[in-house]
Image (cartoon, rainbow, N blue to C red):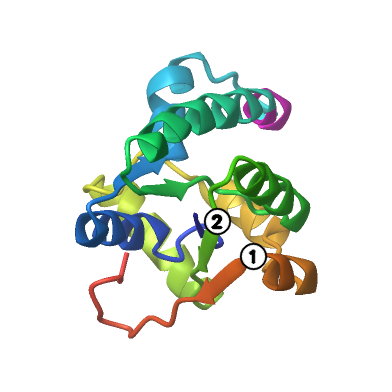
Amino acid sequence: MIEGPVGAGKSTFSAALAASSNGVHIPLDEWFAALFSPDRPSGDFVPWYVQRKDRLLGLIWNHSRRILASGRDVVLELGLIHQQQRVEFCRMIANEGFPPHVHVLDAPLEIRRARVRRRNEERGPTFSMVVPDHVYEMASRLWEPPGEIECEEFEVSFVTQEPNSLFEA
C-alpha cells in the first residue's frame, strides 16, 4: 500500500514500484474517476464521495485478492488518509494471509500544493481528476500519518524523496 497526503508523490512512486517488482498498480483515484466522476454532484460532494469510495475499496480488494493468488504483487494506492481506516484495511489483508507493507510518502505543504496545481494544469500520466484548492486544503488537514499501532502491527516504511528525484510528482 502506498499512502500519504495529496500531492506527496504516491502515483509516481506506485507506478515505479509496480514496474520494478513486476506488480500491478491499482490506483483508486483512476478507478473512481472512470466510474463515478460523470455523476459527481455540485455542492457538497463529500458524503457522495465517501459512499462510493467505500464500495470501490471492496471491489479493489476483491480484484487484488485474485491478482495476489496468481503470484503477482499488488501496489495499492488507495488514499486512506485516516489511521483507523488504514489499520482496518491492513488487518483485512493480513487476515487473508497477505502481509501488508505500507509505504508512506510526504512532502512539505507548499511543494504538494504546487504539484497538485501543476498536475491539474498538465493532466499528465498521474492525472485522474482535478483537485480544486479547497479540496486539497481539506484533504491535507484530514491526513493522519501512521501512528504507533500501525507501525507496530504492520511493516511501515517512510519513503524519503530527493527534491528532483524519480519520485517528484
Q: Position of residue 21 (x, y in %)?
A: 26, 59
Q: Is residue 115 visible?
A: yes
Which x, y percent locates residue 11? Answer: 36, 54
**How many marks are shown on the rendered structure?**
2
Residue furthest to the top: 39
Q: Residue at x 59, y 27 (%)?
A: 58
Residue tagged 2: 100
Query: Is 94 in the magenta?
Result: no
Magenta stretch, residue numbers:
46-50
As shown in the figure, which amino acid type bears the numbered disc 1?
Phe
Three-letter code for the amino acid on which mark 2 is drawn: Pro
Tell me the SS state at disc 2. Answer: loop
Judge the density around disc 1: few (<14), some (14-19), many (≥20) Cα neighbours within 10 Å.
some
For numbered disc 1, what is the local secondary structure?
A: loop
Residue 33, above or below 157: above
**Crowd band around label 2 with a 10 angstrom C-alpha radius: few (<14), some (14–19), many (20+):** some
Q: Is residue 62 left or right of residue 96?
A: left
User: Is mark 1 in CB contact (under 8 Å) with mark 2?
Assistant: yes
Q: Which mark is residue 34?
A: none
Q: How far across and down, in percent of the image, does residue 115 sit? A: 38, 63
Q: Nearer the viewer, residue 35 or 78?
A: 78
C-alpha gap between disc 1 and disc 2: 7 Å
Tell me the quadrant of the picture where the C terminus can be found. Answer: bottom left
Q: Which numbered disc, 1 or 2, marks the residue that appears first in the sequence?
A: 2
Quadrant of the rendered structure where residue 81 is?
bottom right
Residue at image point 59% right, 47% down: 135
- 75 or 91, which is in the foreground? 91
Can you give x and y, in whole percent of width and height, for residue 48 in the image? Answer: 67, 23
Foreground pick, 35 / 67: 67
